[in-house]
Image: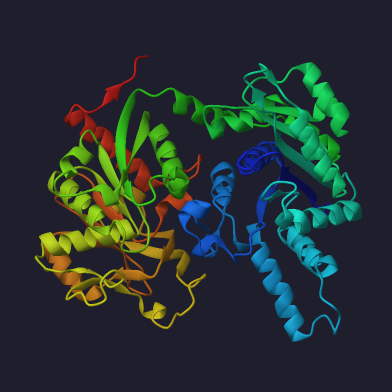
Amino acid sequence: MAITKYIFVTGGVSSSLGKGILSASLAKLLQARGYSVTIQKFDPYLNVDPGTMNPYEHGECYVTDDGAETDLDLGHYERFLNIPTSQANNVTTGQVYRTVIEKERRGDYLGKTVQVIPHITDEIRNRFQRLGKGNNYEIIITEIGGTVGDIESLPYIESLRQMRYEKGPSNCLVVHLTYIPFLKGAGELKTKPTQHSVKTLLETGVQPDILVCRTEHPISKDMRKKLALFCNVKANSVMEAIDVSTIYEVPIAMQAEELDKVVLSKLKLPLKHEPDMSKWEDFLYKLKHYSTTITIGLVGKYTELPDAYKSINESFIHAGTRNDCKVEVRYISSESITKQNIAEKMEGLSGVLVAPGFGERGIEGKIEAIQYVRENKIPFFGICLGMQCAVIEFARHVLKLNGAHSTEIDAKTPHPVIALMEDQKTQNSKGGTMRLGAYPCQLKKNSLAYKIYGQNVIMERHRHRYEFNNDYKDAFENAGMIPSGINPVSKLVEVVEIEDHPFFIGTQYHPELKSTVDNPQPIFVKFVEAAVSYSKQHNLIELVEA
């Protein structure tokens, strides 16, 4: 059996340079060359996972099939590679320390003093290699979170140094993503921050093999030579990562820099064949060449930070290419919506998506928006809390159940149409205790959901504590809101829809988490299709000149 090769991606100079996109792009190129590749993210924070973090702190919390609450970069990995990730693909310092402390409490260390070296670094190295055991991956790419020089990242860099020493440079490669700033006053790019970043890395005993330089302006040949000389890398190992209009261009840009060729050469692996990026290039062409533009309103309470809805935004991009259109997302804070301004807020929209979330803030604004789109026949899509708000709105204004609400918001509501799940009533801990991961859902024949998916049973990912209260199921169905998707085991209502409406659907699960470039999520595709149709009927569509 062939030995697994390891690539580590570190970052320097600044955070938010795009290590996740670089990792996913490199993996895509290697995958296109015929290699089996996976990516993992190591985060240096002490939280066990991002599940308890406010989206403003961390952006979207991404959920895997096996129920792991993970970093949003795992969404990029799945969207680029079209293969699912798992709990093993995201490791945090909190997980590492918890494991080591549990071992110490059991007496696994036989009375020894437990220290960062070797016990924490041994655990990190073990987790570096966990995906390589029994999965037959030829290459594992590991993204190290944070920036070189951060105190909290030091155990990861030391573990990397140890692993590189053990396995040798041809089996363990380091790609350092850095930044080349442009000083407007001087009118030139500056390499000094990158030199200092590499120097900091060298002080930990790690020599990068490849430099990938984020820049807003082209890097000259002389500048590449300078960086190579002062950073101890080969001239052909200094790559330019110039800003592009979309993250989906990065694999093509890195292919032009021959990143995949240099990586395989250093790992002493054959090129196999030229990467087949034809499907990716076709997607990019459609992404840039569309005939129409539509505007969809995203109603939520984290609208100041688009990363809080990262997977939703990317799903709209995927669905747009399938519908020959560009989806412009208009972020609408649900806290800003009132009865007096709702018509103004909804003006010019071809569809409305009410986003997931937790807590009371902004709930009434979401309900107001749903009532407006339901009554005005505007295409609607609600996800998780968005679906629950649709149920509450229907209960109040169609079933005339005054005071109907979710017990999450109002524990004393006279009509708890949304209530705490039975298995959640005994939960006292917040972290990792929700209904998480992929569950089956059986779709009702001839329903909108069935027509969208084209099959009886689907698997979608969940992240919630509250559910549709089945005591009200018959009343809703008789009034026209159909529970069209049911979990076959728990009988949990997972999809609701309204028949007498051009497009009105809500899902308890999070369909945005499974949309990829190769396989756009079907509800998003049909929602965008319905929005395009609505735009044409109401003269809202913006035609693009050929």
User: Residue at point 21% right, 49% down?
Assistant: 369
Q: Is residue 505 left or right of residue 101?
A: left
Instruction: Residue at 45% x, 49% y: name it.
Output: 308
Residue lying farthest to the front in this orientation: 185
**Which residue is at the far top?**
546
Q: Residue 545: name its quadrant.
A: top left
Residue at 57%, 54% in the rendered image: 71
Seen from the viewer's position, the closer of residues 90 and 105 is: 105
Residue 295, above or below 148: above
From the top left corner, tell me how far across and down residue 403 is, in percent: 15, 69
Q: Name the image quarter holding the N terminus.
A: bottom right
Up the image or down, 131 lies above or below 29; here it is below
Quadrant containing the C terminus in the rendered view: top left
Q: Quadrant of residue 405?
A: bottom left
x, y (%) of residue 19?
Answer: 65, 42
Image side of residue 236 versus residue 102, left or right: right
Q: Is residue 270 visible?
A: no
User: Residue 265, image x and y in percent?
Assistant: 84, 35
Viewer-closest of 535 and 165: 165
Residue 447 placement: quadrant: bottom left
